[in-house]
Image (cartoon, rainbow, N blue to C red):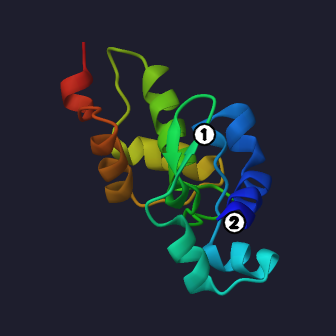
């Protein structure tokens, strides 16, 4: 467990210094290769184990994320969606389609329905309900 946790901390250093938006894509295979363990051993080692961080307590499994291209994790995309919505003009809120365009301009290719899913997970209402 300690060997796996050390590798996770090493590879997710930006997360610990900058926060959730800096969580990098990481696969169990990468940690397995670096530690010389089998992927199933890594999986069992992180299952149900937690790491006390400065900001919170995180399940070790949380540090393994999918890659959405250009080294961007889903958590980083969600953080960026939140930032864009917080900076939007209240009288003209950003639609999911517009968010898709803005993210694509930043090199993050993500479907509109995935943006809607992330927005729902963040408990942010649709643009029509955010209009003031």
Figure quadrant of the C terminus:
top left
122 versus 27 height, above or below: above
Q: Quadrant of residue 112?
A: bottom left
Between residues 63 and 80, which one lies in front from this camera angle?
Answer: 63
Residue 62 in percent (x, y) is at 51, 55
Q: Residue at x 42, y 42 (%)?
A: 98
Figure quadrant of the N terminus:
bottom right
> In the drawing, does residue 117 fall left or right of residue 57?
left
Q: Residue at x 60, y 40 (%)?
A: 21
Residue 121 in percent (x, y) is at 31, 44
73 versus 80 height, above or below: below
Q: How many marks?
A: 2
- Residue most extreme to the front: 2
Q: Are there few (<14), some (14-19), or many (20+) residues within 10 Å of tag 2?
A: many
Look at the numbered disc 2 and give the secondary structure of its residue.
Answer: helix
Q: Which mark is residue 55?
A: none
Residue 101 in percent (x, y) is at 50, 48
- Residue most extreme to the left: 129
Q: Residue at x 49, y 20 (%)?
A: 87
Between residues 81 and 9, which one lies in front from this camera angle?
Answer: 9
> In the drawing, does residue 49 fall left or right of residue 106?
left
Look at the numbered disc 1 and give the secondary structure of its residue.
Answer: helix
Residue ID for mark 2: 4
Q: Residue at x 59, y 55 (%)?
A: 108
> In the drawing, does residue 93 fall left or right of residue 2?
left
Residue 127 in percent (x, y) is at 27, 31
Q: Is residue 70 visible?
A: no
Tag 2 and tag 1, C-beta contact below 8 Å = no
Residue ID for mark 1: 21
**Mark 2 or mark 1: which is in front?**
2
């Amino acid at each position: 467990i300690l060997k796996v946790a050390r590798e996770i901390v090493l590879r997710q250093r930006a997360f610990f210094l900058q926060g959730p938006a800096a969580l990098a894509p990481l696969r169990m295979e990468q940690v397995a290769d670096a530690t010389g363990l089998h992927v199933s051993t890594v999986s069992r080692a992180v299952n149900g184990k937690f790491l006390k961080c400065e900001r919170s307590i995180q399940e070790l499994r949380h540090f393994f994320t999918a890659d959405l291209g250009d080294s961007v994790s889903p958590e980083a995309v969600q953080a960026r969606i939140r930032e864009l919505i917080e900076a939007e003009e209240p009288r003209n809120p950003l639609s999911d389609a517009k968010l898709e365009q803005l993210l694509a301009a930043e090199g993050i290719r993500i479907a509109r329905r995935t943006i809607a899913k992330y927005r729902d997970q963040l408990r942010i209402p649709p643009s029509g309900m955010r209009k003031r």
